[in-house]
Image (tube, grey):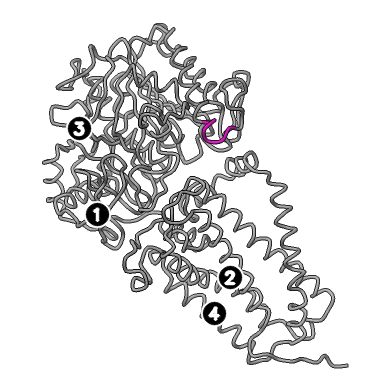
Amino acid sequence: MRHQHTYKVLPQIPVIAALLALSIYTLTRLGLTLFTGFDGTVFKGFEAVPLALWPEVFVKGFWFDLCVISVLLAPICLYEALLPNQWRGKTWHRVLRMVWFWLAIALLLFGAVAESTFWLEFSTRFNFIALDYLIYTTEVIGNIRESYPVGWILAGIGAVAAIVLLFIWSAIRRADAQGVTWLQRAALALFALVVPATLMYYGNIDQMEQPLLPALSPNVNTKNAYASELSGNGLFTIAAAQRRNELDYDKFYRTISQQQANTALADLGVKRTPLGDDLQAKPVTALHAAVTPFSSKPKNVILISVESLSASFMDSYRAEGAALGLTPELDKLAKNGMKFERLFATGTRTVRGLEALSLGTPPIPGQAIVRRPGNEHLSTMGELLKPQGFATFFFYGGYGYFDNMNAYYAANNYHVVDRTDIPKSAIGFENVWGVADEYLFDHVIRTLDDKSDKSTGGKPFFAQIMTTSNHRPYTYPANRIDIPSPGGREGAVKYTDYAIGKFIKDASKKPWFKDTLFVIVADHCASAAGKTRLPVAGYHIPAIFYAPALLKPSVFSPLVSQIDIAPTLMDVLGMKGVEQFFGQSFFSAAPAAQRAFISNYQALGYLKNNTLTVLLPKQEVESFSIAPTTMAATARAVDPLLLNEAIAYYQTASKAYKTGALKVHKTSAAK
């Protein structure tokens, strides 16, 4: 008996699949928006998205979802166009249909869960960070397994997918019974070949930032970073991140002539000059610093770059009466050392902090230099200090292949030590991300003891240490602090504080302690989320200089940047190379620069005179007045002078990397 078909205008299987995907994407967006909160409230620690912006979020979201769904539907449409109608009712095909529908639903639900966890961590849709994490599967998968009940989550996703499939199975069976006409097959093939390409051509990630319905809410500030991110689709944003891994400054950003830029930088005290080949000549013996706070020159420097340590975690940086009690050891060091009140990180990831601390350059758009090709023999601390007689080290508690750290530091005259170099017998606790900080510090002391011993030549040393414990899964050894492991972010901060305090106490028993400057600074903040693209408070990090035999307690209050630490240390050590950096010594003869650089992968911020000037792709510029105390941002007109300075810094830094002018033995001035 011939199978009877009742044809409808639209082929039903692609319609069912599209509605499923659209429903899951919309519910995900709704859940994240509800979680983020309403205007005037703080919910789960996040700021607010005004209700008046919700139409923007969901209308733009619908557009991005359509773009993604069109791509996901393409193979389904081609399959439906080619599938003979007589196969649709076969048992084997029904089983196949059931399996792939269940798998598709499960993958969509898995994406929703993944986006939710990513939002909890970063308050953004998938971006460069997610793209990078896909590369480092060992750490990332291990991190997820140690942070979440993965088995239960996957089982739950599978069960929910099965329940959804049961509800729609009768509609799928009816769709197969209806069959597909030749006209519909032609339409399906045309859709698969034309519609995704068209929508993806017109869809652009920049549309997330563009106001869509200003007439509906003329009194609402449409520049809300949360609203922009919520309007996106994770698959769309991660694809855009892959395409925009590197951004050519001259192509995408506002420019001026390089002569204008060089003049502007010279007026600001930035006069990068070539070193030639004289680094191994007799080093400078007197302090460069015009007004040094040190009683005598330190012999050694230990730079501790602390994972995700926001200034707001330390009571020393918090308002009276708002103590958290998470950093008693660091607060003691701040009280007994030089505390920097207003120092800002350049970015939101470890590699950006490492770039700033080693290379002293403003962040260039796209990926950090640490992760780029051609980053060997740059004018880093290691490349400058080793020829001048220093033993130079980079210590990391994890596997240094992550984020290209080992390759970068090894190529720039550092001796690299990561968890593979620490004896297993010396590791009392570790997780997927790295050994617990205290065991990393123990190994640092063992290594420096050997290098400072007279039998090895008694070289002075410069050591940069990158901690790992203040990172998800937030696990650490038991009985160290009063917050049991895993203690979330608060527990991890307090444990890292404990480990640093123990390290300083252990180091104080060593003969090299009295001649050593300890520098404690964060790589970036725990979160840089906010209503604006570059929330200034999300870049405020602590910094402490501690050398009790050489430096009296004090507070340094001028506004400074992470990129100023490297030239300052070269200055304090009395070594050649201060002029190699875009940053400036805190203690130079000229007044403090009183400016900072903050960025994400695309937005380049220049903070000066309580004004944040932001350079954006497509030659766009934004400007905000920044409240001195709260760091809240209010849109304002662009200041031409500050804009010129911002362009001069970022344009020249980008060109210097591109042309090789950041390398030690190449002329530094960009042509």
Residue in the image at 16% along x and 53% along y = 639
Q: Secondary structure at mark 1?
A: strand
Upstream in sequence: badge 3 or badge 2: 2
Q: Tell me the quarter of the image containing the N terminus.
A: bottom right
Of marks 4 and 1, the one in the foreground: 1
Q: Which residue is mark 1?
A: 623
Nearer to me, 636 or 345: 636
Residue type beneath disc 1: Ser
Upstream in sequence: badge 4 or badge 2: 2
Q: Which residues are magenta?
A: 487-492
Residue type beneath disc 3: Glu
Residue 211 disc label: none
Q: Quick check: 256 left or right of 91?
A: left
Upstream in sequence: badge 4 or badge 1: 4
Distance (Cα) linking label 4 and label 2: 21 Å
Residue type beneath disc 4: Leu
Residue 22 disc label: 2
Residue in the image at 74% along x and 84% along y = 84
Q: Residue 15 location in percent, x, y?
A: 63, 79
Q: Is residue 488 magenta?
A: yes
Residue 579 disc label: 3
Distance (Cα) linking label 3 and label 4: 57 Å
Q: Bin the neighbour count of mark 3 within 10 Å (Cα to Cα): few under 14, some 14-19, many 20 and up.
A: many
Distance (Cα) linking label 2 and label 1: 36 Å
Distance (Cα) linking label 3 and label 1: 30 Å
Q: Is residue 172 magenta?
A: no
Distance (Cα) linking label 4 and label 1: 43 Å
Give the image quarter of residue 668.
top left
Q: Residue 637 location in percent, x, y?
A: 19, 57
> Does the residue at mark 4 contact the one at mark 1 (Cβ under 8 Å)?
no
Q: Which residue is mark 4?
A: 193
Nearer to me, 188 or 348: 348
